[in-house]
Amino acid sequence: MTKTISIIVPCYNEQESIPLFYAAVEKVAATLADHRIEYIFVNDGSADESLAEMRALQAQDPEHVHYISFSRNFSKEAALYAGLQAATGDYVSVMDVDLQDPPELLPEMIHGIEVEGYDCVGTRRTTRAGEPPVRSFFAKQFYKIINRISQTEIVDGARDYRLMTRQMVNAILEMSEYNRFSKGIFSWVGFDTKYLEYKNQDRVAGQTSWSFWGLFKYSLDGIVTFSETPLAIASFVGFFSFAIALLALIFIVIRALIFGDPTSGWPSLISVILMVGGLQLLCLGIVGKYIGKIYLEVKNRPVYIVKEKK
């Protein structure tokens, strides 16, 4: 019995990569017995000719190629969610269009599900060759931090590239939250998962749309979405500051009563006030981040808006 594999391909300004990606996956698809490929390209508000490339591929191969085009840029997370909702396959895969996710791993992924009995076969990079050293350093620190403060384990170097059973995809779709962090969601739903390791691959064409600041904000979203520890830290900092201030006040009063030495030192007093004020603002900022997430959730806005679909 032929089984369908839906491949979700988020695209943002990837006009050069799209035809190269399709050709590379088709070579692998030709070696897959009893499996057919369904492509779901998601145009995340691209400003180049990405949509035109998708239209051309769909006209060339209407049976297998489909696309969804957003009304504007909604983020890769929204594109992944849209692709998961549109996928009809028995198995569903997520792949980057720049071919940094090797299509050659697909046969081994299928084997992992059909023969070894896994619900999901994911991938993780063993090296970050080609990345700026600063980005690699902060990426490693992010995985260390989030795995210490979150109950949801996120594998270091794990990619969105994976093959999942229909049962796992349906479980993910039940999580319809607005603030999405797919790496965490994939882990949170559970299911038996195996990871294939590979070395970092260079982009086949174009430039990445991820800046250091964009990745930093994305990592903060992941921490806030899957951990309450920052709130606990804010509470601890507030209590610690209060305790220190109380002890200092007791010391000053006792010294004044015993030695008659009134407290002096306007500059030091101002420094303490500024320090405590800064800690208060830090704690308010942490709380505000969580409140902001709640605010976005309760407005119940759609995760994305489709302008064109075929």
Image (spheres, grey):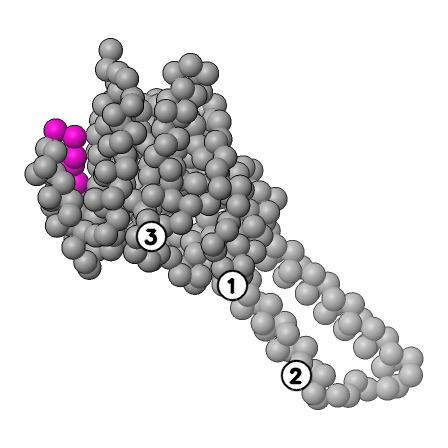
Q: CA distance from mark 3 to mark 1?
A: 18 Å
| Kind of residue sitting beneath label 3 | Leu
How far from the left and from the top, in percent, is residue 181?
Answer: 40, 44
| Kind of residue sitting beneath label 1 | Leu
Q: Is residue 268 above or below residue 89?
A: below
Q: In the figure, residue 274 lies in which quadrant?
A: bottom right
- List the residue tagged with mark 3: 296
Give the residue displayed 30% in from the left and 41% down from the top: 80
Work out whether mark 1 precedes mark 2 in sequence or the reverse, and give the earlier one.
2
- List the residue tagged with mark 2: 270
Give the residue displayed 73% in from the left and 63% down from the top: 243
Q: Helix, strand or loop at disc 1?
A: helix
How far from the left and from the top, in percent, is residue 150?
Answer: 55, 42
Q: Which residues lie in the magenta part? A: 63-67
**Is residue 197 located in the magenta-colored stretch of the structure?**
no
Q: If the image is split into quadrants, where does the C terminus sit?
A: top left
- List the residue tagged with mark 1: 284
Asked if one can make out residue 165 in the rendered structure from this viewpoint, the answer is yes
Query: Which residue is nearer to you in this view: 10 or 249?
Result: 10
Q: CA distance from mark 1 to mark 2?
A: 21 Å
